[in-house]
Image (cartoon, rainbow, N blue to C red):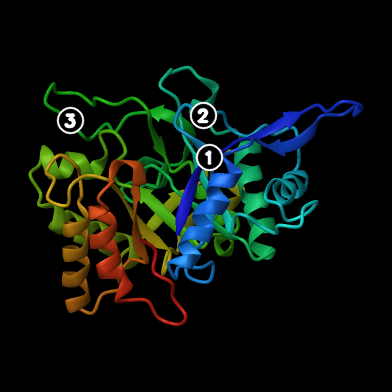
């Protein structure tokens, strides 16, 4: 799967139209995307083998304009994607949610409004029902196996992770902000890519300050996600109190997110080599393994080292009914 960066969901006014309409911004150069798809097909990697998604959001990016409904954005996505109004067909096979916070602490995007989360949930459900692939790429803290707390704010700290100066260092963590769309429509999401490389993540804290080996940390993290309690989120004291306490079942949907660093790097919380070693050891115990691995981003891995390690490993696990992601 290739996830292209990025588009935004906005409200626009057109000449001669009184009311603003829902729209997706231009996104990557369409000709570049189509040429890449064509070149891959020539190499034997056609649309049946390689899927192309478009992401929404990114760090410091705007959250969707919520003055329009999910149905209106669904129509806008169809138009943006070439599914209507053109003869070329769909460019993208689906959408990846990458909504995040902002470096400015009081920025409005450091808070996920009820309307934003509802829009994520409803649009995902509509797209999934139409056969699109829908995924999300939460920073580690936006879907955090280490806490059941829920908050719409992503301007928080990890209070138990004490760095060298004796206090939490990063003030832009979340508390399971991405949990609501998953809890409302669990079947609408095909996979979830956990950004283990979030700034000052639990993963980085454990594998640096606490000295836990990357392989052992990855094993414990995966087992907690897939075998123990999983991600349990308590919505009781939130705008979504009607959900109560929910356990998010991520079986066959966990994708571990890495940074595009050398496979032997010790300056990242988890490398492709150590991720695959962790999964091999889990499988030797008879444990479930994750759906795949992803990394940010292709530009930072010009020699394809990370892709090679992930592809060699997960490619051996592709079956007729389960597509590995790398």
The residue drawn where x is 21% and y is 64% is: 276
Above or below residue 187? Residue 178 is above
**Is disc 3 surrounded by few (<14), some (14 to 19) or many (20+) residues within 10 Å?**
few
Q: Position of residue 157 (x, y in %)?
A: 32, 29
Furthest toward the bottom, the residue is: 320
Badge 2 marks a residue whose secondary structure is loop
Residue 50 visible: no
Q: Nearer the viewer, residue 267 or 308?
A: 308
Badge 3 marks a residue whose secondary structure is loop
Identify the mark nearer the N-term, 2 or 3.
Answer: 2
Give yes or no for contact between labels 2 and 1 (Cβ–Cβ under 8 Å).
Answer: yes
Identify the mark nearer the N-term, 2 or 1.
Answer: 1
Residue 282 visible: yes
Mark 2 or mark 3, whichever is nearer to me: 2
Give yes or no for contact between labels 1 and 3 (Cβ–Cβ under 8 Å).
Answer: no
Please state if 293 lies on the left or on the right of 274 as rendered: right
State which quarter of the image contains the N terminus: bottom left
The residue drawn where x is 64% and y is 44% is: 118
Give yes or no for contact between labels 2 and 3 (Cβ–Cβ under 8 Å).
Answer: no
Q: Which mark is residue 123?
A: none
Q: CA distance from mark 2 to mark 3?
A: 29 Å
| Label 3 sits on residue | 162
Q: CA distance from mark 1 to mark 3?
A: 34 Å
| Label 2 sits on residue | 61
Identify the mark nearer the N-term, 1 or 3.
Answer: 1
| Label 1 sits on residue | 6
Q: Nearer the viewer, residue 92 or 64?
A: 92
Q: CA distance from mark 2 to mark 1?
A: 10 Å
Mark 2 or mark 1, whichever is nearer to me: 1
Badge 1 marks a residue whose secondary structure is strand
């Amino acid at each position: 799967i290739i996830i292209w960066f990025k588009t935004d969901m906005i409200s626009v006014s057109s000449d001669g139209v009184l009311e603003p309409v829902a729209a997706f911004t231009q996104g990557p150069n369409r000709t570049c995307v189509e040429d890449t798809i064509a070149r891959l097909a020539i190499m034997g990697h056609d649309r049946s083998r390689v899927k192309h998604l478009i992401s929404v959001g990114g760090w410091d990016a705007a959250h969707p304009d919520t003055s329009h409904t999910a149905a209106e954005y669904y129509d806008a996505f169809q138009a943006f994607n070439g599914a209507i109004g053109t003869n070329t067909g769909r460019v993208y096979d689906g959408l990846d949610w990458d909504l995040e916070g902002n470096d400015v602490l009081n920025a409005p995007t450091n808070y996920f409004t009820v309307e934003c989360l509802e829009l994520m949930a409803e649009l995902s459900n509509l797209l999934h029902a139409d056969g699109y692939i829908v995924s999300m790429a939460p920073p580690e803290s936006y879907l955090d196996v280490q806490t059941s707390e829920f908050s719409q704010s992503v301007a928080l700290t990890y209070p138990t992770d004490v760095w060298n100066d004796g206090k939490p260092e990063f003030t832009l963590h979340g508390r399971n902000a991405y949990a609501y769309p998953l809890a409302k429509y669990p079947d609408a999401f095909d996979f979830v890519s956990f950004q283990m490389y979030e700034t000052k993540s639990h993963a980085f804290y454990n594998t640096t300050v606490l000295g836990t080996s990357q392989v052992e940390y990855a094993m414990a993290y995966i087992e907690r996600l897939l075998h123990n309690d999983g991600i349990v989120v308590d919505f009781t004291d939130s705008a979504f109190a009607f959900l109560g306490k929910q356990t998010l079942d991520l079986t066959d949907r966990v994708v571990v997110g890495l940074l595009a660093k050398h496979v032997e790097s010790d300056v990242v919380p988890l490398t492709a080599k150590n991720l695959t070693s962790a999964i091999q050891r889990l499988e030797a115990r008879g444990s479930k393994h994750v759906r795949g691995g992803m990394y940010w981003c292709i530009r930072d891995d010009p020699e394809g080292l990370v892709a090679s390690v992930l592809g060699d490993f997960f490619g051996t696990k592709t079956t007729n009914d389960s597509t590995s992601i790398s």
